[in-house]
Structures are given as C-alpha cells and as structure tokens.
Image: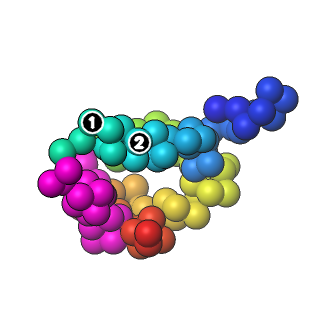
Amino acid sequence: MTLSSDTFVPPGPMAGGVPGFFFGLWEAKQRYGNPAVTWESLLRPSIDMAREGVEVGFSLANAMEVNSDNIKNDPGLRYRFQEFDLLKRLTHLSSDPHLAVY
C-alpha cells in the first residue's frame, strides 16, 4: 500500500488500510442496505471478537510460524503478537481491546 506516489508502507500493521474504506462501507449501507439493520449490529461481531478474543486455529498458527521472522522484525507486529509462544498458539485466544473501542 502506498500513502502517496513516493511513500511506500512496508508489510505490517499499518499496511492494511485503504483510505476511505469505512466511508465507502457506510455509503453502501446508506444507499443499498436494509434500514432495519443498524450499523452497530453490523460492527458488533467484530467488536466482540476484538474484545473477547478469537481462538488461534491451525491456519493462523501456521501463517505466524512461516512469517515469524517478519513478526519479530516489525515493531508493530512484534508488539501485537508478543504474547504468542510457539507451543501455545493453537489454544490461545487472540484479542485486542484497543480495536474494540469505537
């Protein structure tokens, strides 16, 4: 992802955003969505998962193993995944209460 034509954002936690993404979702909901379905009800499952955690399954644990050098070398990823021990990954609940604040 690039922030501008001359700024490259390397892989990591800051590389996942697209400017205007949530505004676009909001606009699509306003124009084409069911009025009986609230924005809060659409976001609630993600908020709850961020707050309460998501079980780390085989695919995520494997992806983390394959990318362990990238995780260790990136300050944001290292901070986010520092709690993971290779032996405990498959039973761990991954959560991030900061993502649950809206």
Quadrant in which the N terminus appears: top right
Provide the major secondary structure of the magenta segment: helix
Q: Residue furthest top?
A: 5
In the current view of this chain or complex, which residue is farthest to the left?
36
Q: Quadrant of residue 70?
A: top right
Residue 11 in the figure: left or right of residue 62: right
Camera-side residue: 90 or 60? 60
Residue 87 percent coordinates (x, y)? 34, 58
Tell me the SS state at disc 2. Answer: helix
User: Hey, what amino acid is under mark 1?
Assistant: Tyr
| Residue at the spot of label 1 | 32
Q: Residue at x 67, y 57 (%)?
A: 75
Residue toward you, 44 or 29: 29
Q: Identify residue type, mark 2.
A: Glu
Spatial distance from mark 2 to mark 1, Cα to Cα? 8 Å
Of residue 45 and residue 25, the one placed in the foreground of this image is 25
Residue 7, horizontal then vertical, whole percent: 80, 34
* In the image, residue 50 lies in the stretch drawn in magenta: yes
Q: Earlier in the sequence, mark 2 or mark 1?
A: 2
Residue behind mark 2? 27
What percent of the width, then of the height, locates residue 64?
Answer: 44, 45
5 sits left or right of 81 in the view = right
Quadrant of the rendered structure where residue 47 is?
bottom left
Marks counted in the figure total: 2
* Quadrant holding the C terminus: bottom left
Q: Quick one: SS at disc 1?
A: helix
The residue segment tinted magenta is: 35-58
